Amino acid sequence: MTFLSIIIPFDTVERYLKDCLDSLTEQNIDDSEIILILNGIKEDVADLIASYDNLNIIVKSFDERLGAARARNEGLKMASGEYIYFIDSDDYLYKNALEKLVNTAKATHADFINGERMATPFIRERFEERFNKKSKYPMKKGKLSDMEFAMRLLVGTRTNKKEILSVLHSLIKRGIIADTLFDENDRFYSDYFFITSIFPRIKTFIGVEDAVYAKRNRDDPINLTSLNQEDHGDAFLSYATAYYDVLEIVNEHYDKTHEEKYKLLKDEMAYTFFDYYYKVFGPNFLYSDDENWRGHVFEVMQKISYEFNMNYLSFIQKQEIKAFQDNNINRLTKFIKLRVNLKKTIRVFKSRWRFKTFIYFRYYNKKPVNEKQVMFCSFLGKFYSDSPKYLYEYLYNKYGDELDYIWVINDKSVKIPGNPKKVKRFSLAYYKELAKSKYWVINGRQASRLHKRGPQKIVSTWHGTPLKKLGLDIGNVHTRDPNIKKSYIKVAKEWDYLISPNRYTTEILRSSFAYDGEILETGYPRNDILYNATPEQVQKIKDDLNLPSDKKIVLYAPTWRDDEYFDAGKMHFTLKLELDKLQKAIGDEYIVLVRTHYFVADKLDLSPYEGFAYDVCRYDDIAELYLISDILITDYSSVFFDYANLKRPILYFTYDLEKYENVLRGFYIDIHSEVPGPLLKTTDEVIDAILNIDDLKEEYADKYDEFYERFCSFEDGNASKRIDDAIRK
C-alpha cells in the first residue's frame, strides 16, 4: 500500500497550481501519490504537470466544474494511501511542513495528525514576510497535550473564520475515513460535516509544531475569487447556521460518551465565535448602518453566546456577555462603546497618520465643499509635473482667479505659476484642503484611506499608455504590498473621470481596475507641450539644465522592477547600461540624461561620468526632457508611447526581457514585433545602434507610422481643453 495519497482539486489559475506543486517537490517524502482532479479547467496545464517528473502525479479530468466536495470525493475513490492528505491547488506548503506530518505519522501511527494553517496574501517566494512580527510566528504547543494542540490547529486561529473545521493540512488514516464522503450539496461547509462524520472513529490526535500550511487569500477578488471569498448571501447567517449544526452533533456525541475530544472541539469553536463577537459584532452593533446587526444578527449571536466558555473570559468580558444575554441594551452598549472607543483612541494617538485621518473624517469632512476649488497632485506630491501640471496651467490661463487652486507638493520651494496654495502630502493642511476641494486631479491612485464626499469629483489622468501588465492583470504580486490589487479596485470605484490617450488604453484601464465609470478619450494633457512648444522653450530647458549646446542628447529612462524593493513602498534600481563604454564610444557627439522611475528611492551616483552623464531623476517634468532629446533609450517603461509623438528614434535596452516578460509582469503588446525600434540586450548593441541611428530610422519607418496611428493619433496639443469641456459642460 502507498503510504500517502495527496488529493488536489484544480479548476483555475495555473500560477497558483505551480506554487502548490513546487512546494510539494520540496517536501522530502517517499512512497506518495498526488491525485490531481482537473475539473472544468480552461487552461492547458499539461506541460506544467509533465514538468514534475519527480512527483507521482495521477490525473483525472472532468469537462465540467465539479465543486470542491465532489472533486475530493473523486480523489478519495482513487486513493490507495494508508493516509489521506488534502491540499487546495491555490495553497502551498512552508518549509518541510508536510514532511514533518509524515515523519510524525510514521513514528506514531496516529489516526489524525495536523499542522497550522495560516491565511496569507503573499506569493510563495515571500511567505516568510508573514512572520514579520513575533505575534505572527507559528503557534507553539507549550503545555497543551497532543489532543489539545491538534484541536487548536484544527479549528485554527490564523485562518478565515469560516474555516473552523477544515480537512486541509491533516493526515487522516484511510481506515478512519472508510466510506465517508463530502456532502456535494453543501458548497461552502462540506468540510464541517466530513470532519464530524469521521470524528467518532478518531482515537489519537497529534498536532505538530512549525508545520505551516499557507492558505492563500487570492489577490484578485474580482476575477479569481476563491470559495472563501465568494459572496453567498448573508455570510454570517450561513456561517452561524453551519456552526449550530456542527455544535448539535458535537453536543450529542459528548452527551453520550463524555469523551474529552468533543469538549475540546466545542471549546475551541466557541472561542472562535467569541473572537468574532468581540472583534466584528461589537463594532457593527454600535456603528453599522445595517439594522440587522441590532436585529436578526443580534438574536443569532445572543444564542451562540451561551456556548462561550466563561472560564476563559476576564471579569469585564463576563459582565458584557451577561448584559448581552440579559438583553440589557443600555449596559451592553456602554461596555462595547468603552472598549471599542478605547481601542480606537489608542490607535489614533499612537500613529500620526491615523490622528490626521481622524481629524479629516471627524472635522474637516463636516465642512462645506468649495465648488470653485481644484486640488492637483502628481506622483504622490514629489513633482510639479505630468498631466496634472498641464491641466492646471490650462485652467489657470483660461480662468485665472475664478478658481481656487491647491497643489500637493512635498517641496514647497518648487516654483508653480499662478501662486496656488501649496500643501505637503498627508499634512493636516493637505487633509483640510482635500476635504474642501470640489475636484481632485491625480495621475495615479489616491490613498485608500481617503473617501470623497457626494459633491466631490476625482479626475484620474493616469500616467501612461500601459505596456506592462497593470492592476488586476498582473499575475503574482512582487511589490511590497501583497494586497495591492484590492487597493486598485477600491480606489477606482471612487473615480468619476479616467483620462485615456487611445482606445487601446481605454480597454486596459477598464479591465485592470474593474472600472465602469466614465473614460474621456482626449489624449494626455502632458503631451500637449510636445505639439505646442516653441524653439525658445526648448532652448530654455537646455539652459536651465546647464547642458552643452554642441552635443546631441540621449535620454535613458528605464522602468523599475517589481522584485527590486528594500523597504515598505521603496524600490532600488541597478544601472545596467555601462556608461563607461558608452562614454568612450559616443562621448564626442552625445551626452546622456539618466531618468529612473519615480518609485526608485536610492540616488544614482554619476560622478565618474561628469560632463557626459547627467542625473535628471529629480527633474519635475519628463515631457520637457523628451523635447530636448534626440534619441530615447528605454526598456518596459510607458515613456516610449509619449515620446513617439515626436517621431524620434527609440531604442529598447531589454537586458532582462525573458524574466520581465514571463515572471515579473508580462506585456499587453508583442514587444518583439510591435514596438518602433530594436530590442537590445547589451551595451555594445546600444552603442552600435546609436552609431547607425540613421539606418535604424529608415528600417523602422513603416512600423513607426503604424505605431503612431494606433497609440498617438488622439494627440494634437488640445487634450487639456477637451477635458475641461467634458467635465465643466
Image (cartoon, grey):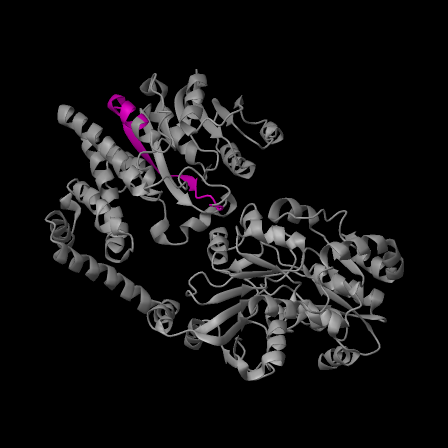
Q: Which residue lies at the image location 32% right of the left edge and 41% below the top edge?
A: 235
Left or right: residue 112 versus residue 519 is left
**Eyeballing the image, is 276 above or below 268?**
below
Quarter placement of the C terminus: bottom right
Left or right: residue 254 versus residue 544 is left
* Most foreground residue, 624 or 364: 364
Count numbered badges in the picture.
0
Furthest-front residue in this view: 729
Residue 12 in view, yes or no: yes
Q: Which residue lies at the image location 54% right of the left edge and 30% below the top edge?
A: 41
Image location of residue 289, percent across then percent down: 29, 55
Residue 308 in view, yes or no: no
Q: Is residue 629 magenta?
A: no
Q: Is residue 209 magenta?
A: yes
**Eyeballing the image, is 309 above or below 602?**
above
| Highlighted magenta segment, given as a residue range | 194-221
Image location of residue 44, percent across then percent down: 60, 31
**Eyeballing the image, is 30 above or below 556?**
above
Quarter placement of the N terminus: top left
Q: Which residue lies at the image location 46% right of the left edge and 55% below the top edge?
A: 490
* Most foreground residue, 607 or 727: 727
Image location of residue 466, percent across then percent down: 64, 55
Q: Quadrant of residue 696?
A: bottom right
Image location of residue 20, percent across then percent down: 50, 35
Q: Quadrant of residue 241?
A: top left
**Eyeballing the image, is 50 above or below 532?**
above
Q: Which residue lies at the image location 32% right of the left edge and 42% below the top edge?
A: 234
Left or right: residue 430 versus residue 465 is left
